[in-house]
Image: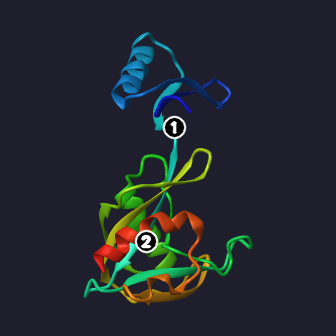
Amino acid sequence: MSGGWILMRQDDNGNRVEMARFDARAEAEAAATEFEARGHKQMYWVTPAVRVVVGAALFDASGRHVLAARRSAPEALAGRWEFPGGKVEPGETVPAALERELREELGVVARAGERLPGACEVRPGLELQIWTASLLAGDPHPLEDHDQLRWLDATTLDSVDWLPQDRFALPHVEQML
């Protein structure tokens, strides 16, 4: 997929149309501004070419345990473990999405930290990033798409059957524990 940023427009019928791809966000935004300056009546916006799914390496207060969540849905993923999280919505920052997803999925208040190195393409156009997060308030409970939670330390990190896409983050998390 060439170009990391897509210039989109909405036509008169409300359809979303890709106009062009750019390597830099600034170039895409300049093109959108130019179209609007020419008096085009359609709505223009810039969006990343790849949608991000964010997972949380959520650490407890001691920093010696990280939370793993066992999927209950969809059926193809049920029984496997992951770092909880979800899709970043348009216009949302990755840290804000991570904090929102942890509230929705676990019922906790957390603060997003730093992105761990690497990423995994879940499917074309969808990239998983893992970020650290600190638990600020609440006791995690599996509220959405999970049926079990487990706090793991450095010696038990490999004791669960992780989803393949989450595995790239394990060595980084292990170093932090």
Residue at 32% from the left image edge and 80% from the top image edge: 135
Depth check, front residue: 125 or 18: 125
Q: Which quadrant: the N terminus?
A: top right
Q: Nearer the viewer, residue 84 or 99?
A: 84
- Pick whichever of labels 2 and 1 is earlier in the sequence: 1
- Crowdedness near tag 1: few (<14), some (14–19) or many (≥20) residues, C-alpha within 10 Å: some
In the rendered view, does 120 fall on the left or right side of 58? Answer: right
Quick one: SS at disc 1? loop
The answer to which quarter of the image holds residue 59 is: bottom left
Foreground disc of the pair 2, 1: 2
Residue at the spot 73% in from the left edge and 70% down from the top edge: 76
Q: How far across and down, in percent of the image, does residue 81 sit?
A: 57, 78
Q: Residue at x 36, y 76 (%)?
A: 174
Residue lying furthest top: 38
- Residue 155 lies, in percent from the top left, at 40, 89
Q: In the rendered structure, which amino acid carries the disc numbered 2?
A: Leu
Q: Is residue 89 left or right of residue 155?
A: right
Q: What is the count of numbered marks?
A: 2
Residue 50 rendering spot, x and y as whole percentages? 52, 43
The label on residue 170 is: 2
Give the amino acid at mark 1: Ala
Secondary structure type for disc 2: helix
Residue at the disc numbered 1: 49
Q: Could you tell me which quadrant the C terminus lies in?
A: bottom left
